[in-house]
Structures are given as C-alpha cells and as structure tokens.
Amino acid sequence: MNSIERLIFVIVCFGAIAFFLKNASKLFALMCMGRWENRFDNLWSRFGGMLKYGFGQRRVISRKYGINHFFIFWGFLILVCVYFEFLINGIFPEFNLGFLGTIPYGILLFLADIMSFVVLIGVIIAIFRRTFFRPAHIAPSFDAYFILSLIGILMIAFFTTNAAEANLNNLRMISWMPISNRLSVLFASIAKNDVHIISRVFWWIHAILLLFFLNYLPYSKHLHILTALPNCFFRSPNLISTVPRLKFSKGEEFGVSKVFQYTWKDLLDFMACTECGRCQSVCPATITDKLLNPQQIIHKGKVNLFKNGVAIRAIRPADMLASAPANAKMVVPLINGGEESITKDEIWACTTCGACMQVCPVFIEHTPKIISMRQHLVMEKAEFPEELNSLFEATEQRFNPWGIAPADRTKWAIDLNIPVISEGEKVEYLFYVGCAGSFDSRARQITISLTRILNKAKVSYGILGNKEKCCGDPLRKLGNEYLFDKIVHDNIESFKKYGIKKIITACPHCFSTLKNDYKQYGADFEVIHHTQLISELITEGKIKPKSSNSSENKTVIHDSCYLGRYNQIYKEPRDIVKACSNGKSPVEMENHGNNSFCCGAGGGRMWMEELPGKRIYLERTHQALKTNASTIAVACPYCMTMFEDGLKDEGVSDKVCVKDIAEIVDEAIK
C-alpha cells in the first residue's frame, strides 16, 4: 500500500468509525430515555445466561435451520479479531497479531480461513431457503437479502485478497490458511502485476464493505447484532409472569401511550428484535388469523422509537420523571396513529399465553408491553371492548366477573359440610375456590371433586365462603390495574385476618396471580395448585387411586399456559394421570409442555367475543382430537370451558369428554 492509499484509508476508516460511534451513542441515549428498571442484580447468573443463550445460541439451535445461524454467528465472532488486524494493518502496515506467537497466530488464521468458508456456505443456504423454502413466519425482505449479499461478498473478498497475496508471496503464514492457499493456484497463470491489481481491488472492496456494514447495522433489521447479547444479559431469569405494580398518585398517567414511558429494557427489546418470526409462528392469535402479530408489535415499537427520536431526546431529563410531560409531542403516536402505530384490535387480541416470549431467541418481553398499553386504554381513555363493561362493573360491585351475588359463592357446598374459616380457627390450608369454581356450573364439579380428595386424604383445610373475592387476574390482564389494586389489598387483609399461610387453588389463573402478582404487595403465603397437592398425596400414599378406565381408552394432557409455561408445572398432572391409569402415561398433542397451544381464554379473552378469524379454542380442540384420545385432561376451569365448547362445535361430545385432573382422581378413589 502506498502513502496516498494509506492516507485515503485512514480518512475513510476514522470517518466510518466516528460515524458508527455517533449513531451508537444516539441509540444508547434513546434507550436511556426509558423508565428505570433494575436489571443489574445476579450479575454472575446473567453473565452465564448470556454465554448460554447469547453465545451458545441455545434457543436459536432448538429450531430447524438454527444451526446455520449458529455457524454464521460464530464465524463472525472469530473474524472480528482478523478484521481488527485488517483495519489496524491498513493504517500501520507493519502491524499484525504475530506477537501472540506463531502457533496461536497460526491457529487464529486457520480458524478465520475455515470460518469464512463456513459463513459463506451459511449465507448461500440462508438465501436459498428464503428464496425457495421460506417458512410462512419469515417475511420476504429486501433488507435480509441485502445483508446476506454483503456478508457473502465480504467473504469472497477475503478469500480473493488472501489468495492473490499468497500468489505474490506476501503472506508468510499462508500455510495456516488451507482454503486461501488452495485458491492461490487460480492466479498462477496471471501476470504478477495483474495479480497485484486484483489484490488491491479486492482489499479495498473488503475494506469498504466492512466499514459500510458497520454503519449500516443501526439502520437495518440486523441491529440485533449489536443489541442481542446485551438483551440476553438483561433477560428475566424466568418467563415474565406479572407486570410492574402501578402507584396511584395525583397527576400520574397510567399505562403506556408514548414509547418513552416504557422502561429502558423495553426499549432495548425493540432494538434487539431479530425479526426471525418465531414469536408469530407460535402466537395463537396470529395462527387463527387475528390482527395481532407479536413480531409486528415489537417492530412498530422500534419504528415509533426511531421516528420520535429527535422529539424524545429534546425532552428535559427532569420532565422524564413525569409520565407524560407536556412538551413530549410525539411525531408518531404509539397507539392508533396510522400504519406505523399499534392498533387497539392488536392490543385486545392477545391471550397473554406467553408463547412468544418462550421462543424468542433474545428474550424479548412482548406480553407486559401489551398489558401496559391496555392499562392506558382502560384507565386513561376508557376505550375497551363493550363486553368488558359488565366484567368490570360486576367485579367491582359483586367481586366476581359473573356478577352473581356474593351470597351464592357457597351454593356448591350445601350439604357437603365444608369447613368455613373464621377468626381463631386454625387450618393448614385455605382452599381458595375462585370465581369459576364457585359460580360456573361445570367448574363446580371440579370444586366438589377436589373437596372429596381433600377429605379422603384427611387434609386440614377450609374455605372463606362468602368472604372470598376474585383474585383479580382478569382485571390485571385487561389493564384495569386500579380495581386490581383495590381487590388485592382486600384479599391480603382477609388472608392476614384469618392467619392464612398456605393456599390451594384449582384454577391456574388464581394460582399464578396469588403466587406471583401478590408478592408485589408483600404477600408471604405459600400457594399450591391442586395438581401439586394431589401428586404429593399420591406419593405419600394418603390416597390410592385405582384405574377405572379400560386399556383401550387414551387420555391426552392439555397444558394450561398459566400452570405450565408461566409456572413450569408439567410433571405433576402427568404423574397423576399415570397413577390413575395403571401406570399408563397420557398421550401428548404435537404442541405440549413449553410449546403448548393456548385454549384462547387467557388474558381476559374468556369474557370477550372472538370475531375475526378462526376460533383459538377450536384450533386446540382439533389438535387434541388428532391424538384419538377419549379423554382430554385439563387442570384449569377456563380450559375446561373452551374444550367443551370445541367438542360441541365439532359434534363429538358423545365420543370425547373433558375432565379436570381432580375429577379423574376422584373417580379413581371412589
């Protein structure tokens, strides 16, 4: 390289790096405009998670073709060292990493050469797949082809430059680079002067593409190359099962209507999206042709953040302490502001099943963002589906979504001699019956079966009777945080009054809410789902179920979202069914465990009309019927309702039945 070439490169290189740092600082400044959230605890655990999920690509390789991305990713990691040497060498020609030692430097060159070839093959496979075998969840994108082409040309330039330099005997360690060394023979019949020109041309192609690629990242869908690893580091250790508690003070705006009202981690989520489409491929709303697409929710959030970047950065730091400073005039509204905004239909279509979060390779938290927008629509705008009026009024006035008189809560217990807890009376467990278990005629049968099991095992328990109130799950998921807050305080006060330390629930929504959400209010009681307790009673021999089914009958398990995905209870229901079937394990649907498919009732959807597209509960019912099982085992009253509706719609109620786990055990111990 002559002095003029070097001078040009120095100007281009420093200019490109300065431009990149400027854009990176803008992105960082935008992220910092979000509300504070502590994600700096358990640093060693976070670092280990980043190694496992970021560098190890655990969730990426769990899906087909994920291994292709794994090799492209690791190829780039190794090439970073070589690219660093390349840029420094362009400024200081005598510089190289040879000071590491001959063998370490040789190994680095060997890996760079091999991984460049691996990356090139990976790019070809990715382009071929997108062109001829593109999955439905991957949208056709010019940006994706452009980036893949850039990477491919970058690898070709790398090999061409090295091969030409090797032919000119300018690479003293070419023997460590088997592919480049082999390719050098292609220049054997070309004049040395022409080889030198080819070498310089491709060196500059390599340099320009590398610096262009660096500066294109902040503007492309591949921004995640910079943000994915930090997002894995700051991930939640468990699937997000709740939303932050709101404080109700004068002048406060509730929920999220402007993008900067999210936390800094939420804004990092927007920037970290890889647009891989995995979230939409498992979303029950998307699959059944609703308007909701979780990938688009995140994408629109990113677009909104960038469109409003100048306005957001103009807000004074002191004003950020307020929820909605007067001078925060957003260019693009976050909700219902046109094509680049999120619509109310999208917001209300979510079942909060968490499947999107379960599969996201960079741990984006979709569901809490949707609930935050619901909070704004409900508490600030009073803009929510008409059918929710009855739900909110009934829960506020009669403490249950059905609006039935509280005095009717214990009608199911007439003549059953169920103990009602009173002051001074000590029992080991409170059986928190829940609204469905108290008022829904089908769910009452589950309640009665569970009390029979508890009585059979001589468990010390009692109920609150008419003093029991809704746990508040539908209120929180639908965004009515104010009413949820009031009910939580009432319930915790009641639990303390009667000295409650352990609570049994038959509803996963009650279970998850009491177990996870109530902790934000200082609750210190233990919450147990009935499948956990029943499994324990069987193990301890306190109940001894006997199979009443013929060997030809098959039982299929449905995993409730709020029992399984949110609280990782999968083993107990299966152990119980096995114990009640002479050791015969239940059959599984294609979507089960962490990959289970929602019944469609979560997130308050139990009380909402499902008008657009297909019915989610029917989609799940079809999956169950494919197993040819005669019994569908559930552990949730919402799921029970959805499956029974599905079987009726399909006209097979006389051939297939739905039973709660408690009902299966109750039959087996009679």
Image: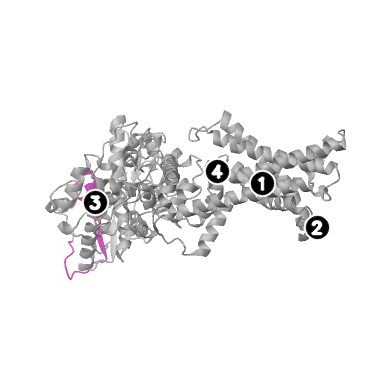
Residue displayed at 43% across by 52% down: 313
Specify which label sits upstream in the sequence, 4 or 3: 4
Q: Nearer the viewer, mark 2 or mark 4?
A: 4
The residue to which callout 1 is attached is 12
Q: Nearer the viewer, residue 470 or 374?
A: 374
Image x and y of residue 598, in percent: 37, 42
Left/right of residue 650 with respect to residue 360 in the rendered view: left
Disc 2 to disc 1, how far (Cα)? Answer: 31 Å
Q: Secondary structure at mark 1?
A: helix
Residue 196, percent across and down?
A: 82, 39
**Residue at which label 2 appears:** 102
Can residue 627 be seen in this snapshot?
yes
Number of numbered discs visible in the structure rendering: 4
Disc 3 to disc 2, C-alpha distance: 74 Å
First-in-chain label (4 vs 1): 1
Q: Which residue: 66% across, 44% down? A: 210
Mark identifier at residue 447 = 3
Whether residues under marks 3 and 2 lie with C-beta atoms below 8 angstroms apart, the answer is no
Q: In the image, which residues are magenta? A: 420-446
Image point (41%, 43%), residue name: 304
Amino acid residing under circle 3? Thr
